[in-house]
Image (spheres, rainbow, N blue to C red):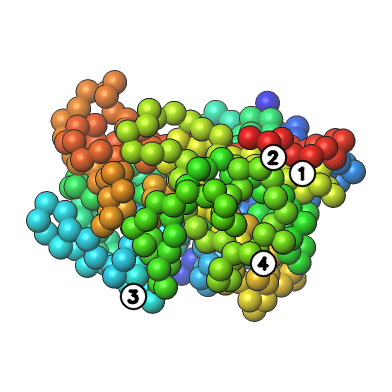
Amino acid sequence: MTQVSHQQWGQVVGLGRVDLWVLQSSLVRVEVLTLGAIIRSVCSRGRDGRMEDVVLGYDDLEGYVSDKRYLGAVVGRVANRIALGRFVVEGKEYRLDVNNGPNALHGGLRGFNKAIWLATAVEGGVQLSLTSPDGDQGYPGEVQVSVSYTLQGETLTAEYQARSTKTTPINLTNHAYFNLTGQGAADVYDHQVCIRAQSYLPLDDSSIPSGEIRRVDGTPFDLRKPVLIGPRLKEVPGPGFDHNFCLSSPGDTWTERHAARVCHPASGRVLEVSTSQPGIQFYTANFLDGSMTGKGGARYGKHSSFCLETQSWPDAVNQGFGLVTFFTPHEFAEDEATLPGGYLRFCRVKPMLKCLKTCILSTDQQGATPLVI
């Protein structure tokens, strides 16, 4: 049984009160903030029985208010990058706030990560809701979004939903940074990663997909069998992993799929991720530089953590890839109110996005080699 509680955690000038929600099972403790729908902490036992917080974050609210790296937050309206901060829908060009070189990243200058969400208790967790007005950060339509975090045993599930008054792109994800040793550890070089993807998206110089869908065979991006992150990072061009791995292809039947598994052999902690989305961004904290002071005075440096961001493919709003990320308002029946996450077909029916991400944080008691998937 999961215990759910909440308390006031602080106040943001001009925005209002921020609450801290706590989800506690017999195995895992999760803290969630109403600011940015942030996962502030995830505490789990290692093989030695000690509880450790495995999510990077801050000790106080000011850290999250000033944060520029999206620690633990839900990002949107559109996660990842949109090339040149513009797209065309129904013959009209929309220009977005540009905040990452020439591109729009994670929703713009003030995305969903900087908003205070309305929280409501649900069975085993909390639902957070937000209304984004028409024109917010340049996007069309008023959008109502929600994310529900529920904890059952060692399984944390995030379920996203959204609907809009106009045709608009939506791509929601959570940007938690993990280190399975504990959030203050120096790096994740001794972690083993496995991602169940046959292909990935190469990037151009501004981190926009080049347009090619490339097989992982014979490349450093072949993570279908467990590999140590440290040695593999030496083979990856650039500062590290920050790439979309393709979990499914256009036309595939929608289903929740096992996507990734990360294991820390020394502590025995294992993180497994399943999702209904067609992609997952594996990011190795390449742009953390040690200037951030996190929980307990920890300094978060390059490769100090990793992110597994379940998503539709980056810049699909411009490139398509056969996965159109638009959805359109229309009359609908209640039993037709959901679209499979990620496969947001431009079909003028079923105006609600629904997608899932499930994380299982467990302990490998025997230190065995991680499961090959």
Position of residue 106 relative to residue 66, above or below, is above
Q: Secondary structure at mark 1?
A: strand
Q: Which residue is mark 3?
A: 102
- Residue mark closest to the camera, 4 vs 3: 4
Pick the front one: 16 or 216: 216
- Residue under the image location 75 percent in, 32 percent down: 26
Disc with the residue nearer the chain's start (2 vs 1):
1
Q: Which residue is mark 2?
A: 361
Disc with the residue nearer the chain's start (3 vs 2):
3
Quadrant containing the C terminus in the rendered view: top right
- Residue under the image location 40 percent in, 68 percent down: 204
Distance between the alpha carbons at the discs numbered 4 and 2: 27 Å
Q: Position of residue 215 (x, y in %)?
A: 47, 48
- Residue mark closest to the camera, 4 vs 2: 4
The image quarter in which residue 152 lies: top right
| Mark count | 4
- Residue mark closest to the camera, 1 vs 4: 4
> Which residue ends up furthest to the right in the rendered image?
48
Within 10 angstroms of label 3, few (less than 14), some, or many (20 or more) residues?
some
Disc with the residue nearer the chain's start (1 vs 4):
4
Q: Position of residue 195 (x, y in %)?
A: 59, 44
